[in-house]
Amino acid sequence: VYRGRFAPSPTGHLHFGSLVAALGSYLDARSVGGEWLVRMEDVDLSRCRDEYASSILRTLEGLGLHWDGAVEKQSERSSLYNAALESLRPWTYLCSCTRREAGEVYDGRCRAGAALGRQAKTLRIEAPKEHREFEDRRLGVQRGSVAAAGDFVLRNSEGHYSYQLAVVVDDAEQRISDVVRGEDLLEATARQIYLQELLGYPRVRYLHLPLARDAAGQKLSKQNRADPIDARHGGCWIAEALRFLGQRPVTFDEPARMLAQASAQWNWQWNS
Ligand code: GLU
């Protein structure tokens, strides 16, 4: 069975970049009669707001992107992440380095024990040098580095679980078969596969979608205040996102009808 998901972080309203990920994952699921879940990735509560979560859900509904089951929130799933950390214990250690000391690629200097007299609150996992190979449905065989960021964080010094940990636990626990998301996360995939291996989880299939950029070539994101999607013009936005995804145009209509036609003619093997 096919089970997909859209997993936004509620740090802002739905914008064109996240609509592309939502629509791509939705159509990929519905085109094969699969299920489609929505999950709120709000592990880092300091950056997330409930009002953004409800705004995102309202916009999805307005666009006719109806999901299956309940919307899970990562902020309410700590016990699952904790249990996973317990299983990962042989490969993890506490680190006392600040973010600045650690730098972009952490060299593992706390592996043998944190610096004397300093509080060690960041939990990291040892990242092996070996790469991981995986097949991306659009981009073909990929070789990704597990150690791209060195020994990476599973729980930060404030006690927030990391995205890498939460996404792997949730995808497995929700029995997701297919991850369809933006290409910006291609680079994180090897790390996620490594965690799946250690936790004994099955691998999922991956499809990384092209990334929507602004006129200056920057990834559209909530941080750079990409314009929010207004569901009152849902048809226009769906048409625009379909064009971006290289799909054949659909008859302009109310969102639900456009989505039905788009899923019937969904073709992810576009040229891009
Ligand atoms: N929460 C992530 C984001 O908003 C997406 C995670 C994923 O699809 O794996 O970019």
Image: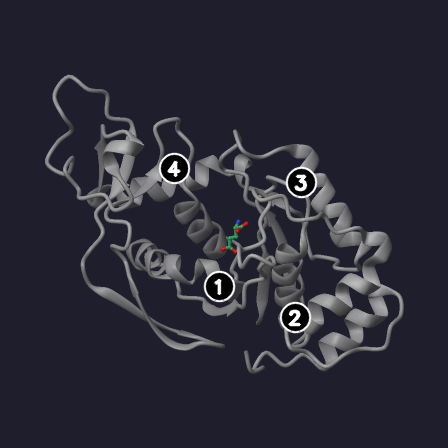
Quickly name the residue at label 3: 53
Nearer to us: label 3 or label 4: 3
Nearer to us: label 1 or label 4: 1
Q: Along the horizontal axis of the image, is 45 left or right of 200?
A: right
Helix, strand or loop at disc 2? Answer: helix
Nearer to us: label 2 or label 1: 2
Quickly name the residue at label 1: 183
Give the percent coordinates (x, y) of residue 9: 57, 44
Quickly name the residue at label 2: 244
- The yes-or-no answer for disc 4 within 8 Å of ligand 1 is no
Helix, strand or loop at disc 4? Answer: helix
Give the percent coordinates (x, y) of residue 130: 20, 63
Q: Earlier in the sequence, mark 4 or mark 2?
A: 4
Quickly name the residue at label 4: 82
> Residue 102, located in which quarter of the rendered image?
top left
Helix, strand or loop at disc 3? Answer: helix
